[in-house]
Structure formats: structure tokens, C-alpha cells
């Protein structure tokens, strides 16, 4: 044996210390990553829960009209021909909500055109002032 070399037990102890140190660093890195991922997941979950009500379907009662005639066209006398004429002149098919007296853009204008002159219930989601229509149904006549 040479005196220049450390005893074998000292080398083993040093190796164990280095391996433990590396293992601890790896564990810390893994824990940091898991913590970061957990925080991102929690933030995404909270965001989804807060945003969920805006995606829920709602329904409104009113009239299909056009943006030119607007509230004047929200009645049983309004005709499909009038709406078509106004749309050709640059107007849009819209929904007039009886509750808040506002006009809303709608996405299913072909379906809406079949309900001109009828009071209807529109079901869908309201996003950025426009209704993404799920259905349009005539309101039952009151007796």
C-alpha cells in the first residue's frame, strides 16, 4: 500500500457523501418541479371554476328582428321580407330581449329567420355581447 492514497474506508465515505449530496439536489429539483406544477394546476382549476358560470346555457324571451328595424321590428307584424331587405342593405339578424330591451347578435341566423314575427325563447350562451344559440323555440301563446 502506498501512503499517498487515502484508506479505502475514507474513499467509500467520500463517495457516499457525494452520492447523498447529488441525491439531495435531485430531490430538491424534483420537489421544486412538483410544487410548480401543483401551483399551475391549482391556478387553472380556480380559473376554470370562476369562468364556468359564463359558459352555462341561459335563455331569453323576445323577438328575432334586424339591426336596422331594431325594437320597432320586435313584434308580430315584422315580416321576413323586411328582415331580408334590411340585411341586404347592411343590417344583421339580431335578437331583441324583452327583459332588458337590448339587441344581441346571434350566430344561427338561418334558424332565426324561420322565427320572424314570433315571440321566441332563445337558449344559448352569452359571450362578448353575442348569443351563441343552442335553440330557438316559439313562446306558447297565452290563453
Image (cartoon, helix red, strand yellow):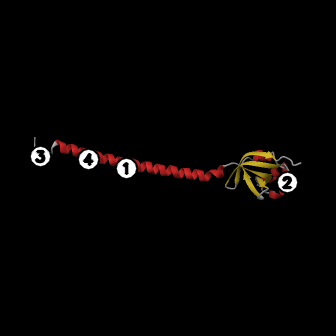
* Percent coordinates x, y for residue 43 in the rendering: 53, 52
- Which callout, 3 or 4, points at the residue further toward the start of the chain? 3
Q: Distance between the residues labelled 3 and 4?
A: 21 Å
Numbered circle sitting on residue 28: 1
Q: Which residue lies furthest to the left in this view?
A: 2
Q: For the N terminus, which image quadrant?
A: top left
Residue 55 visible to the viewer: yes
Instruction: Name the residue at the top extreme.
Output: 1
Marks 1, 2: nearer the viewer: 1
Query: Which residue appears at 10% of the width and 45% of the height?
Result: 3
Disc 1/disc 2 C-alpha distance (Å): 69 Å
**Front residue (pair 69, 34):** 34
* Along the viewing direction, whichever of 114 and 61 lies nearer the viewer: 61
Dot 2 corresponds to which residue?
A: 75
Residue that numbered label 3 is attached to: 4
Q: Between disc 1 and disc 2, whose residue precedes?
A: 1
Q: What element carries label 3?
A: loop
Distance between the Cα atoms at labels 1 and 4?
16 Å
Residue pointed to by mark 4: 17
- Local secondary structure at mark 4: helix
| Marks 1 & 2, CB-CB < 8 Å contact | no
Residues marked 2 and 4 touching at CB (< 8 Å): no
**Other residues around mark 3 within 10 Å, as few (<14) / some (14–19) / many (≥20):** few
Name the spot of residue 45 as percent of width and height, x first.
55, 50
Amino acid at each position: 500500500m502506498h501512503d499517498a492514497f487515502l484508506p479505502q474506508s475514507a474513499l467509500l465515505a467520500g463517495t457516499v457523501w457525494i452520492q447523498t449530496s447529488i441525491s439531495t439536489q435531485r430531490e430538491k429539483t424534483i420537489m421544486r418541479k412538483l410544487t410548480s406544477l401543483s401551483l399551475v394546476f391549482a391556478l387553472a382549476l380556480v380559473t376554470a371554476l370562476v369562468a364556468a358560470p359564463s359558459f352555462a346555457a341561459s335563455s331569453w324571451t323576445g323577438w328575432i328582428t334586424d339591426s336596422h328595424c331594431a325594437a320597432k321590428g320586435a313584434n308580430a307584424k315584422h315580416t321576413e321580407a323586411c328582415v331580408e331587405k334590411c340585411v341586404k342593405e347592411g343590417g344583421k339578424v339580431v335578437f331583441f330581449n324583452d327583459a332588458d330591451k337590448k339587441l344581441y347578435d346571434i350566430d344561427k341566423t338561418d334558424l332565426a329567420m324561420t322565427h320572424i314575427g314570433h315571440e321566441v325563447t332563445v337558449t344559448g350562451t352569452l359571450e362578448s355581447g353575442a348569443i351563441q344559440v343552442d335553440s330557438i323555440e316559439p313562446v306558447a301563446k297565452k290563453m
